Image (spheres, rainbow, N blue to C red):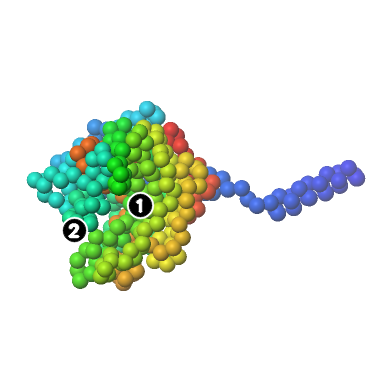
Amino acid sequence: MASRCRRVAIAAACCATALLLPAVPSAQQAPQPVFTELFAYDPAQPAQLLQKWLISAQLDSALRPLRVGVVADPIGHTVGRVTVEAGDGLDGASAKDERAVCDAAGSRAGEMEAAGETVPSERAEIQLKTDRATGAGEVVKFGETVWYRFSFKIGDDWPRDAPAAGRLPCRTVIHQVKQDAFKDGRSCEASPFFKLEARPLADRVRFFGQIYSGSPCATPPRVMRAQICVRELPRATWTVVQVRLHPAHTGGRVDLWLDGVPCGTYQGPMGDPQYGARRNGMPYVNTQPRFGIYRDRRAETQTIYFDRILFWNADPTGNPDWGAQPLSR
């Protein structure tokens, strides 16, 4: 009888202890993504991407299936591919105007701007498909935190620039989120309030995140830029990017990880509180996340690959997809 009582007492104590221990989140309990792109499409049917994505409006419609698609990758499954060639999505110059901003000696953008010249750009990007009128499908919103991850690989066709004295590596944006700004019904050409770049530099690329705030519509423009996570990365190698983004005109925050390692944090304003795009009187992110290549004009072809793009509207810690490497599906 005494032995049985001891067993009951021990069991009761164990139950009480278990009640005090914090619950360990499981994959089933962890928040599920609100947007998932695995690029599991037939490479012969690139139009399947259009179920979830828009392709740069500036890019000739005949070129879109050639520049954006999916391909088999050595990691064992299909991945997204975006390619830019000379003249693609050209803005700021005519096709007859062959001025290049960038070449192997780096960027002339600074010189051109100082001379009052327009700096032509080229692009091929995919952007999350949403309804601007209602906000349906939007994943990045002012005043709300979003977590997301994606993997990217720089193609071996990227130029191997060696910037000359006084020149910078060539602007090459691979991801951006933007709130446009308008004054008197005209665009003020606002920069993305968050972007990631991978600028060609010899056999590697210079990767960094940049945050933008202020008013490009003011006279003179009043803007601020801050960089985080400046790294030199190898080409032809997959890199996993994780982002925690809280866009806000005051009190914004960005946390960035590369391959699971913390790589930088920004805290401060984002976007344009005065002239930024609004819907029903409230600021909104009218350019949802884009992935691809937006660059200063140059002659060389560049290709980038993407895999496993996922977004969450709650902390995804505990969800295996949050930190998954490109080779897992």
Residue bearing the label numbered 2: 116
Residue 52 at x, y = what percent? Answer: 30, 47
Q: Amino acid at mark 1?
A: Lys
Residue 296 at x, y = what percent? Answer: 24, 47
Residue found at the far left of this picture: 96
Tell me, for residue 133, which label it has, or none.
Answer: none
* Secondary structure state at the residue bearing disc 2: loop
Q: Nearer the viewer, mark 1 or mark 2?
A: 2
Residue at 22% x, 37% y is 300
The answer to whether mark 1 and mark 2 are in CB contact below 8 A is no
Instruction: Estimate the spatial distance between the alpha carbons at disc 1 and disc 2, rounded to whole Å.
Output: 25 Å
Residue 316 at x, y = what percent? Answer: 49, 49
Residue at 26% x, 52% y is 110
Q: Amino acid at mark 2?
A: Gly
Residue bearing the label numbered 1: 195
Q: Nearer the viewer, residue 209 or 1?
A: 209
- Image quarter of residue 240: top left
Viewer can see residue 205: yes
- Image quarter of residue 138: bottom left
Residue 328 versus residue 133 in the image, above or below? above
Viewer can see residue 312: no
